[in-house]
Image (cartoon, rainbow, N blue to C red):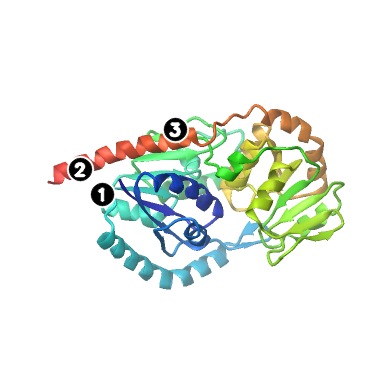
Amino acid sequence: MRILYGVVGEGMGHAIRSRVLLEKLVREHEVHIVASGRAKGYLEERLTGVHGIWGFTLAYEDNRIRKWRTVVQNLKGAAKGWPRNIRRYFELVRQFEPEIVISDFESFSYLFGKNRLLPVISFDNMQIINRCALDPALLAGFEKSYALARSIVKSKLPGCFHYLITTFFCPPLRRQRTTLVPPVLRPEILAAVPEEGEHLLVYQTAEGASPITEMLRKAELPCRVYGVRRDLKADVTEGNVTFRPFSERGFIDDLRTARAVVASGGFTLMSEAVFLRKPMLAIPVLGQFEQILNALYLEKLGYGMFATQLTHEALTTFLQRTAQLSAALRRYEQAGNAESFAALDLQISRAAERSRKGRRVSN
């Protein structure tokens, strides 16, 4: 099959998941990839056939989305980005005629497929907001954020052939053509052997992270911090806090040997922590309902705690509960990526049959 695969560039979790799926798909199909932002560079280092496009971005400050800055930077980006996307569209039509489109919350590939009357398979974690019946009691106090997020997600990729939703929590489905599958994990995570160490792994990339690091200095255990000082070339230790330059191998090793994790509500790291059975204190980026939802269900399942900000009280309570949270995590089961791969293969097969029927009718 000839497949066009689109990856949204906002948030590296989409690229990390898509890399795993794409490494499988390129062994079995002819695949071209469209990606924007940091996702493009990440995928180009690992795969061929990656085409750069312009995509929507978010502006962050003090662990929250800044709406006005987001609007301004996207208006500026669109002035050059949309003409480039139009050129890319016609290049793909001329050079590569896809039979199926797979979109990880990415609009260019989706619109390409719809315009060419191709089956579009959605594969992401975001559609859970619209296509599942979420627990009303859990959403108490977040109703407005939920309503807004649901309207955005609903309008992002409407009318897909099928929706595959990757998740570690499983609310009831409310829409047809929807399948819940386990998180797609990097082979490096699947190969990691968990050990219980003493350190706290902290991942924080939002601007204005200094209050968090000040709080960590008061903790009575070693903290290994990634993302706060992005220009580091080597470790910098200040008391119990060690700031580390990013290294995928080093980060995964720190994750598998951590006592616990403190990070935002991003789905990828959270699902990796759950798989490795590491309790997590989730501090979602304000204004990102998807991260709030992840954190709420993480706490409901007993796998971690949700906090709107890192305080001494929240951190102390979390550390006191790590043994209890670890016990709950031992109940989690996931057989690697087998179930997710099988679900994708099934939908590709079904979409291919539909595509063949469409060609027979047009002929």
Q: Answer yes or no: do the residues labelled 1 and 2 have beta carbons within 8 Å?
A: yes
Tell me the element at label 1: loop
Classed neighbour count for the residue bearing mark 3: other residues with Cα under 10 Å, few (<14), some (14–19), many (≥20): few
- The quarter in which the N terminus is drawn is top left
Residue type at mark 3: give it.
Arg
Q: Is residue 326 above or below residue 235?
A: above
The quadrant where residue 299 appears: top right
Tell me the element at label 3: loop
Residue closest to the far left: 363
Q: Is residue 253 above or below residue 207?
A: above
The quadrant where residue 296 appears: top right
Q: Answer yes or no: do the residues labelled 2 and 3 have beta carbons within 8 Å?
A: no
Tell me the element at label 2: helix
Q: Is residue 37 visible?
A: yes
Residue type at mark 1: give it.
Leu
Residue type at mark 2: give it.
Gly
Q: CA distance from mark 2 to mark 3?
A: 28 Å
State the residue position of label 1: 117
Please name which of the two marks, 2 or 3, marks the residue nearer to the observer. 2
Left or right of 137? Residue 175 is left
Q: Answer yes or no: do the residues labelled 1 and 3 have beta carbons within 8 Å?
A: no
State the residue position of label 2: 358
State the residue position of label 3: 174
Left or right of 96? Residue 218 is right
